[in-house]
Image: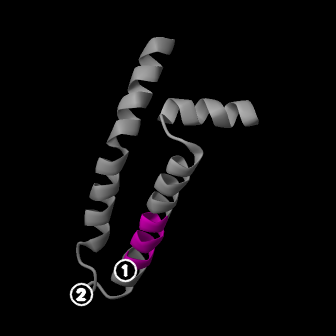
Amino acid sequence: MINKIKSHLKDANKTYFQHQKFALKISWKCLCSSITAFIHAICPAFFEYTTSSSIENMHNDLEPIYSMLKGKNNTQD
């Protein structure tokens, strides 16, 4: 398990605490997005574009990870 963690951190090019901070930030954004989507489902006048904007921002935050995964998958073919 330790080796898998070390390998993941190396792939992510982050220290343990940098990774933890990033993952907690994304987790918090997901939680908030879930809450605003739930409220919007009940009353569409609230949080009209909040969730979709948040998802777009998270996508931009995760873009470097997508690029890294594409590179990793291409080398395994």
Give the tally of numbered discs: 2
Q: Give the distance between the C-alpha atoms of the residues marked 1 and 2, in whole angstroms.
A: 9 Å
Vertical side of 77 occupied by 61: above or below: below
Residue 6 position within the rendered picture, expressed as x and y whole percent measured from the top left: 64, 33
| In magenta stretch: residue 29 | yes
Tell me residue 34's x, y (percent): 44, 71
Q: Residue at x 56, y 36 (%)?
A: 9
* Relative to 63, residue 43 above or below: below
Which residue occupies 47% across, 34% down?
A: 13
**Label 1: which secondary element:** helix
Looking at the image, which is closer to me, 57 or 40? 57
Predominant SS of the magenta segment: helix
The residue depicted at 42 percent of the width and 16 percent of the height is 74
**Which quarter of the image is occupied by the N terminus?**
top right
Q: Which mark is residue 41?
A: 1
Q: Amino acid at mark 2?
A: Ala
Q: Position of residue 61 (x, y in %)?
A: 33, 50
Magenta range is: 28-36
Residue where numbered disc 2 is placed: 45
